[in-house]
Image: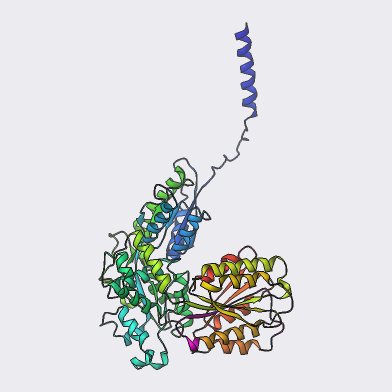
Amino acid sequence: MRSGLSALLLLVVCSCKCSEQPTRAPGAAPQRALPVELRIAYGSEKRSWLEEQIASFRATSPKTSSGRPIQIHAEAMGSGEAVQDILAGTSKPHVFSPASGAYITILNDRFQSAGHLKPLSPPGEPLVLSPIVIAMWRPMASALGWPTKSIGWKDLLQVNANPKGWAAFDRPEWGSFKLGHTNPEFSNSGLLAVLAEAYAGARKTRGLTTEDLAAKQTQSFVHSVELAIVHYGKSTGFFADKMLERGPSYLSAAVLYENLVIESYAKNPSGTPLVAIYPVEGTFWSDHPYAILDAEWVGAEEKEAANAFLAYLKSKPAQERALAHGFRPADPAVRIASPIDPEHGADPKQPQTLLEVPNAEVLRKLLEVWKSIKRNADVVLAFDKSGSMAGRPLQQAKAGAKAFFDSLQDQDQVTLMFFDHHIYPPIGPQTLAKGRSDLLSRIEAISAGGGTALYDAIAQAYRDAQERGRQDPSRIRAVVVMTDGRDENSRLSFPDLQRLLSSEDSSIKVFTIAYGEQADLGVLSKIAEASKGSSAKGTAETIVQVYQDIAAFF
C-alpha cells in the first residue's frame, strides 16, 4: 500500500514538473543558441587583411559542432602592449597573434617568471610573412646608391654622423637625417629594429648572446643609430601614416614592415614614393603567429572556434587576399607576385640575410641595454591648473602626470610648468633619477584657480626647450601640454603660435592632451600637427592611459 502511494505521489510531482517547462507556441521560432565569442588580440600591422577576413568568415555563418554561432571580437594593438595587458589581466584574449613570435617568447618568459609552471602560449602557426625594412623616400635612398648598392645601418650612420647631414650628399635642402622606430617595449617593429642594430654592432647574424650585448662595440653601434631617432612611439602604423602626411621634413626613414611600404602606394599615389631597404647586415621576418592561449578563460568551445577561424585564415583564398594586401603568404603554394614588386617599392628576392630571434634571456638583456643607451628625453610638462580643473579633473590629471613620470626613464629630464591665466616659473629641468619625488610633490600640492593662457604657456615651454636644445642636441626635446579648456588670456594669437611651432629647423615636438568635453580638440590637434607631434583626447577614466601612451614616444 505504501509503495503504491509513493508511486502515485511521484507521478503527480513529475506531472507538475513537466507542466512547468516552457512550451513553444505553434509556429514560433526555436530558441537561438548563445554565440561563442572569440576574442583575438592581434598586431595592428595586419588590420586591413584581418578585418576583411573576419567579415568574410562571418558571412559563412560559422558554428561550433554544438550549433552555437561563432562571433569574433578582435582588437588591434601593439604586440608589446598586448603582452603587458594579458599579464596584467586587463585583457583576456582567447587568441594572441602578435607581429612576431618574439613576443610569444617574451609573454611566456614573463608569465613563468611570475611563478607559473607552464607557458601561457604555444608557439602558434604563422599566418602571413612580412620582413622588417627601413622605409625611405626614393630620392633619399637613391642618394645613398639604391638600388644598385646594398644599403645597411652603417650607411645611415654616415649620414647622421656627418655634421653637414644630407648636404654631404649634395642635398642640403633635406637638412639632417631623421630616423623613426617604435618603442621596443610596446611594439614588435621597434624590438626587432633594436635587435637588428645589436646584431650589426656585434657583426653576427645568429647566436647573439648577453655577452655580445654587454660589449662596448655593440652598445656603441646601437647608441649611434639611436641618436638619429626623432621620437619613439607605440604604433608602427603611426610612423607610416605620418610619413605620408608630413613628408620628408618629418622623417628621412622609419623602421616599418614591407607591407606598409607597399600599402603606401595606394594611400599616397601622387606623392614622393617610399622604397623598402633590406639592411645588408640582415633583418627579420615578422611571422604573425596565431596562438590559442592555454589559459583558464579559454574553454573547449573557444578553442574549437579559434581552430575554425585559423583554418579559414590558412585557406588559399584568404592567403591570396593577404598577398593583395602586401603580405607574403605563409602558404608556400601561393606564388609571390604583385604588389610585392619594384613598382611598389619592394624586392621579392629580398631579404638575402635573415637574423635569428634569440632566447628570452637575450631579449630581456636587449631591452635593459636599450633603456640604458637610448636617446634620452628632455620634456617640458605644461600643467593646466585653471579654475575649471577643480575637483575630480585635477585629481585625475595629477594621477595621469604621476603615471607619465613613472613611464619615463631615470636618465630622462623633466621641467614642470604650471599655468592658468599666468605662466608660473618653471621647475627644472630635473633628471628623474634625482628629481622625481620633488616634481611629484609639487604636482600633488597644486590647487586649481584662474583662467587659461594656453597659447602663451605652450610658446614659453617651446622656447625654453628650444634654448636647451641648442646647448645639448643629444636629447629628444618635447612639450607635453594638458588642458581642459579653451584659450582665454593669451597675448599670443593662434596663428603666431602655429608659425612658431612649424619652424623647419626645430626638432621639438608638441604633444597635446584635450581633457574633457570643454577642451578645444580641433585647436589642440592643429597645435600638435604644426610641430609634427601628436594629439590625444582624455577623460577622467582614460587620462592615466593617455599619459602612459604619450610616454611611449620617449
Q: Is residue 133 above or below residue 115?
A: below
Left or right of residue 123: residue 478: right
Q: How many labels does the image show?
A: 0
Q: Does the magenta stretch include residue 519?
A: no
Residue situated in front as seen by the camera: 384 or 326 = 384
Residue situated in front as seen by the camera: 366 or 231 = 366
* x 64%, y 73%: residue: 442
Where is residue 300 drawn, in percent x and y? 44, 42
Q: In this view, does 361 lie above or below 112?
A: below
Q: In which quarter of the image is residue 367?
A: bottom left
- Whether residue 256 is visible here, answered yes or no, is yes
* x 44%, y 63%: residue: 80
Left or right of residue 11: residue 66: left
Left or right of residue 360: residue 384: right
Residue situated in front as seen by the camera: 193 or 59 = 193
- Magenta segment: 469-491
Instruction: Identify the residue at the far front of this view.
Output: 434
Where is residue 260 drawn, in percent x and y? 40, 72
Where is residue 71 drawn, in percent x and y? 50, 51
* x 33%, y 69%: residue: 214
